[in-house]
């Protein structure tokens, strides 16, 4: 074989071999399924607060379900909201061609916390009973309830003197309106920040509106609080 032709073949083979080590373009992959978590409603339940936690601590946790058989202090009862969710599968679009790169892609090691697709636009808490002279039946009680638990991504407290200062429902909504990480969440715990002045059992009505326009109306079981003057 002609030495010149043989040299050209060897050179071409060498270039191809070198290129196979350094050039690794993204190969088109078939579409894969991704999952979106959608809120379809909310379950509501009343719990007695565990005795080892409180609004002056960094954790306010649910205890046993409140049965209504005894009167309780205003900060001994938690209204728990649990989101009813549905997992919706969608086809993820894959890019057909990727840019040339000699550097491998880097991926975060920590998994991203799951989040619900929708955000909460508004929460309205009222009661058909008088809570106090300043809060008669039908008036907003948003400023009387603290949010003591919410899913990751939502802001529900700030630190004051090294301790958590929980937001009222009004403050919770204000702080998460422009929070890009906020979402409907999987759990919200509500607890009163003041005792009712009138001695009577109370039922609360909670209306939640999502940013897709869906509205959910909830009602608590009857709660017998110890009056502020008792």
Image (cartoon, rainbow, N blue to C red):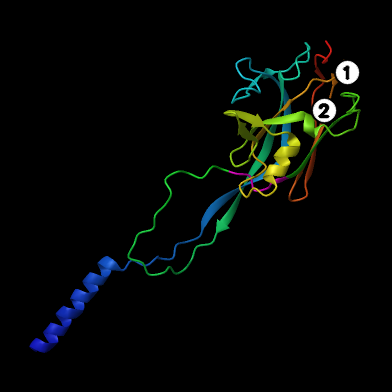
In the image, 223 versus 168, the foreground residue is 168
Circle 2 residue: 204
Q: Which residues are magenta?
A: 115-120
Circle 1 residue: 198
Q: Residue at x 50, y 62 (%)?
A: 94
Q: Residues within 10 Å of mark 2 (few under 14, many from 20)?
A: some
Camera-nearest label, 2 or 1:
1
Rendered position, 174 above or below 107: above
Helix, strand or loop at label 2? It is: strand
Residue 93 inside the magenta-drawn segment:
no
Say whether residue 1 is visible: no
**Left or right of 136, for residue 61:** left
**Quadrant of the frame with the C terminus:** top right
For the image, the number of numbered tags is 2
**Left or right of 164, for residue 124:** right
Helix, strand or loop at label 1? It is: loop
Give the alpha-carbon distance from disc 2 to disc 1, as whole Å: 15 Å
**Left or right of 93, for residue 47:** right
């Amino acid at each position: 074989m002609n030495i010149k032709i043989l040299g050209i073949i060897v050179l071409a083979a060498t270039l191809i071999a070198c290129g196979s080590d350094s050039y690794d373009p993204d190969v088109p992959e078939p579409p894969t399924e991704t999952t979106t978590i959608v809120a379809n409603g909310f379950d509501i339940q009343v719990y007695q607060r565990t005795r080892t936690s409180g609004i002056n601590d960094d954790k306010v946790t649910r205890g046993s379900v409140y049965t209504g058989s005894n009167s309780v202090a205003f900060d001994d009862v938690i209204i728990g909201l649990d989101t009813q969710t549905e997992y919706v599968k969608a086809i993820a679009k894959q890019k057909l061609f990727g840019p040339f790169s000699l550097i491998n892609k880097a991926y975060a090691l920590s998994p991203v916390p799951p989040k619900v697709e929708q955000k909460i636009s508004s929460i309205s808490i009222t009661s058909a009973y008088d809570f106090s002279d300043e809060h008669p039946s039908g008036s907003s009680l948003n400023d009387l309830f603290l949010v003591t638990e919410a899913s990751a991504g939502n802001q529900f407290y700030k630190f004051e003197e090294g301790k958590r200062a929980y937001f009222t429902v009004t403050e919770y909504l204000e702080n998460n309106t422009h929070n890009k990480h906020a979402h409907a969440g999987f759990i919200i715990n509500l607890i009163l920040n003041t005792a009712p002045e009138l001695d009577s059992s109370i039922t609360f009505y909670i209306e939640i509106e999502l940013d897709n326009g869906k509205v959910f109306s909830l009602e608590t079981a009857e709660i017998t609080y110890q009056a502020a003057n008792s």
